[in-house]
Amino acid sequence: MLRHVSEAFAEDPLRILRTARFAARFQPQGFRVCDQTMSLMRTMVAEGEVDHLVAERVWQEIQRALQEHEPRAFFEVLRDTGALAILIPELVPDPAFTAAMAALHCVHQQDGSIEERFAALMSPLPEQESGSRTQALKAPNDCKNLARLVAAVLPALTGSGEQHTPALSADELYAVLDTADLWRRPERFALLLNVLACTLAPADQQVVQTLKRAADSASGVEPKALMAQGFTGRALGEAIRQERLQRIQQAITP
């Protein structure tokens, strides 16, 4: 049982986050936060103590919690004390919370990086909400950029609310690859695929493999070969685009 040992606990609201982090560390061993400590933390939240936490210190605790043995427990404790409604209010309502926990757990089981874990956590949020919240949390750029990217490409991959993802055309796949800046950031694109695999519904999983095939094919275009053919300037850019589109079409054609 995780229990505060003194009423002095209430003097520092950061202890709420640390208690939640200990829960994330020890929950697999059967530990939980005791009712009295949960009650005290709820009182601290109700009295506005969490409002005064500095963003950098909040991020430090979130970052550590994402790497604990059961990261979901951290956010569950914060939700149950009311602290999550102050720190990441967009994740409190269902189905956002349930989806975020499922995606985070999936990435955690794959031993994902901090960037992947954070992007999975924020994946249920629309792009604007995700960007605003990651900015407010002062997350590092790698985390912010991957979370933003996941939020940006998901609408194109989920059929805009349809029951299943429609087959994407070569142009649509190219647009996703271009948004992801595959051409300059192939390592980040690999992280994106990992997060998408943990975020998309089972019926939509095929699109991850389609994206991978499209990326592998389009990445093989050699600008130098096209330059040797006399393409320059804008004409070179368009020739590269057309060659990539052609390869993507070949990759997705049965």
Image: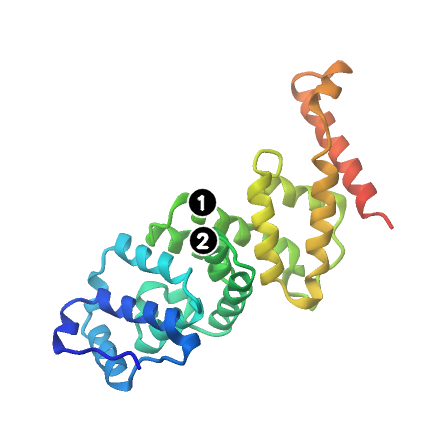
Residue 237: give its label.
none
- Up the image or down, 129 lies above or below 145; here it is below
- Up the image or down, 102 lies above or below 219; here it is below
Residue 138: horizontal and vertical position, in percent?
33, 50
Q: Secondary structure at mark 2?
A: helix
> Farthest right residue?
254
Comparing labels 2 and 1, the label whose residue is closer to the camera: 2
- Up the image or down, 155 lies above or below 95; here it is above
Residue annotated with mark 1: 142
Q: Secondary structure at mark 1?
A: helix
Q: Is residue 177 rendered to the left or right of residue 56?
A: right
- Residue at position x 45%, y 53% in the image: 114
Q: Is residue 53 rendered to the left or right of residue 166?
A: left
- Residue at position x 53%, y 54% in the image: 151
Residue 134: horizontal and vertical position, in percent?
39, 53
Residue annotated with mark 2: 114
Amino acid type of the residue tagged 2 in the rendering: Ile
Q: Mark 2 and 1 residues: CB-CB less than 8 Å, in contact? A: yes
Q: Is residue 159 rendered to the left or right of residue 14?
A: right
In terms of depth relative to the viewer, which is nearer, 13 or 235? 13
Mark 2 or 1 closer to N-term?
Answer: 2
In terms of depth relative to the viewer, which is nearer, 126 or 14? 14
Amino acid type of the residue tagged 1 in the rendering: Asp
Quadrant for the N terminus in the image = bottom left
Q: Residues within 10 Å of mark 2 (few under 14, many from 20)?
A: some
> Farthest bottom residue?
35
Q: Is residue 80 rendered to the left or right of residue 178?
A: left
Q: CA distance from mark 2 to mark 1?
A: 9 Å
Residue 246: horizontal and vertical position, in percent?
80, 36
- Residue at position x 17%, y 78% in the image: 5
In terms of depth relative to the viewer, which is nearer, 235 or 114? 114
